[in-house]
Image (cartoon, grey):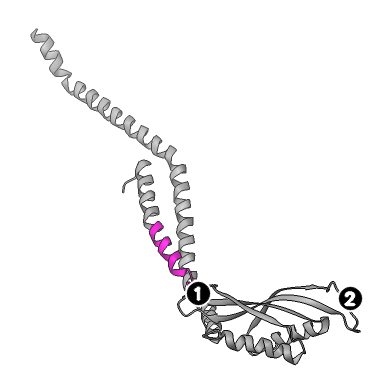
Amino acid sequence: MKEFVSNALSKLHLIIFLYGAWTFYSVYSDYEVQIDEISQQKPAIEAEIKKAEKKLSQIDEFRKNVDQTKLRVNEVFGNIEKVQRQLPSEINDIEILDFLSKEGRTLNVPELEPNPKDEQPMGFYISKQYSIKGRATFLQFVVFLERINGAERLFNVKDFKITAPTEAQKGRFQIVNFETTIDTFKFNSSYKESSGVEEIESEFNKKEPTERVRGKKKAKDDGGEE
């Protein structure tokens, strides 16, 4: 028994050395497994990094262009407001009906019948239509439209219809029945045009923090540190 104990003690340093070597090998093997797992994840992580870099580049480019876009959009809407201010503030039916009737009398079209319709909001301006019926020569009708086009107030000929009378005619000039609709306009003081830039920026700022959170979560799921 003493001899066995003596032999064991004499080989104790060897046992300790072998145990230490086995422990080191076991730890090193685990470390190699982890290194191999990380190496396998490396291409996917690099791909995610490239995607993130590309997105950041796009974000930076967007931010660089925002100010220039704002200037251009504000210039466009400034022009819209300028046009809006050039439109009359009111539409006076009496004045317009008098103008149309006067043009009819000047062209010897006594049967001219203008009738106002309801106003229609069209954004930054309000439109009002007038239906007109009459009986005249074709040339008189064309001249009538030209006079409307040359008026100080802005008019738009929306549509027209010309038909030949059913009864026989004795004069040298062809008489026609005509119907037309014209628009006139005034500015809409209660309407404010929106450029849309503020809404886009607001939506963009809402999405950006969400993308950062997703990126952090993805990195964590891939084994990275937050």
**In the image: residue 155, left or right of residue 32:** right
* Residue 159 x, y percent position in the rendering: 71, 73
Highlighted magenta segment, given as a residue range? 194-208
Q: Residue furthest left?
A: 2
Q: Amino acid at mark 1?
A: Gln
Give the residue drawn at x 89%, y 75%: 168
User: Magenta residues: mostly which secondary structure?
Assistant: helix
Q: Percent position (x, y) of residue 13?
A: 18, 23
Quarter of the image where one finds residue 143: bottom right
Counting residues from the N terminus, which is met first, the one under dot 2 or under dot 1?
1
Residue 59 on image: x %, y % = 46, 62
Q: Residue at x 35, y 35 (%)?
A: 34
How crowded pointer 2 is (Cα within 10 Å; few <14, some 14-19, many 20+) is rated as: few
Q: Is residue 205 magenta?
A: yes
Q: Which residue is mark 1?
A: 68
Question: Residue 91: within the magenta?
Answer: no
Cα distance between the residues tagged 2 and 1: 68 Å
Please give the name of the residue rendered at 50% of the width and 79% of the height, measured from the top-left corner. Answer: 188
Q: Which residue is labeled 2 in the image?
A: 168
